[in-house]
């Protein structure tokens, strides 16, 4: 039986699509954390059947924008005294910077150093973003 204690103060990222938990874990650099962190994969979920979950026993500054891009359906629970004090649902941001990189090899952002990678949301329903430099469309679903 897997037993992971509840956290006193920190963040629980819940309802992550199975298999996406490790992407968020890596994006947040949690493999380098010096505090308690748990990545739970393929946990049972009444709502989705299976899910991934991340528990972080610490207050960290999370870029919620980046999390929405990986999985729009996840929720972030802020925990204090072992209770949820805030529940945050994700929405796709209108603009993102330095979260994804343009795939177009001719784009200036792929050849020049120190350029901010900028994308604008062009289709919310299909999670499509457009590179601000070359208009390359980036599909967040694929």
Image: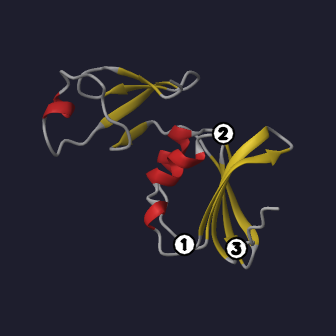
Cα distance, mark 3 to mark 2? 22 Å
Residue lying at the far front in this picture: please name it.
Answer: 1
The foreground one among 1 and 59 is: 1
The foreground one among 8 and 130 is: 8
Quadrant housing residue 106: top left
Q: Residues within 10 Å of mark 2 (few under 14, many from 20)?
A: some
| In this rendering, the label closer to the viewer, 1 or 3 | 3
Residue 93 image offset from top left, x and y in percent = 49, 39
Name which of mark 1 and mark 3 comes first in the sequence.
3
| Number of numbered tags placed on the structure image | 3
Name which of mark 3 and mark 2 comes first in the sequence.
3
User: Judging from the image, what secondary structure is the residue with disc 1 in?
Assistant: loop
User: Judging from the image, what secondary structure is the residue with disc 2 in?
Assistant: loop
Q: Residues within 10 Å of mark 1 (few under 14, many from 20)?
A: few
**Which residue shows up at 52% across the image and 26% down it?**
127
Quadrant housing residue 90: top right
Residue 7 image label: 3
Q: Are marks 3 and 2 in contact (CB under 8 Å)?
A: no
Residue bearing the label numbered 1: 59
Cα distance, mark 1 to mark 3? 11 Å
User: Judging from the image, what secondary structure is the residue with disc 3 in?
Assistant: loop
Residue bearing the label numbered 2: 17
| In this rendering, the label closer to the viewer, 1 or 2 | 2
Cα distance, mark 1 to mark 2? 23 Å
Residue 142 image offset from top left, x and y in percent = 50, 24
């Amino acid at each position: 039986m897997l037993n992971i204690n509840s956290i006193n103060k920190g963040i629980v990222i819940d309802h992550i699509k199975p298999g996406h938990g490790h992407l968020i874990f890596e994006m947040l650099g949690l493999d380098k954390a010096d505090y308690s962190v748990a990545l739970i994969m393929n946990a049972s979920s009444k709502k989705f059947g299976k899910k991934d979950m991340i528990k972080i026993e610490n207050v960290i500054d999370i870029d919620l924008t980046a999390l929405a891009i990986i999985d729009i359906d996840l929720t972030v629970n802020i925990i204090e005294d072992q209770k949820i004090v805030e529940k945050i649902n994700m929405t796709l941001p209108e603009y993102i910077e330095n979260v994804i990189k343009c795939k177009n090899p001719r784009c200036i952002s792929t050849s020049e150093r120190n350029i901010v990678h900028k994308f604008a949301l062009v289709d919310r329903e299909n999670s499509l973003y457009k590179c601000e430099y070359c208009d390359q469309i980036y599909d967040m679903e694929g």
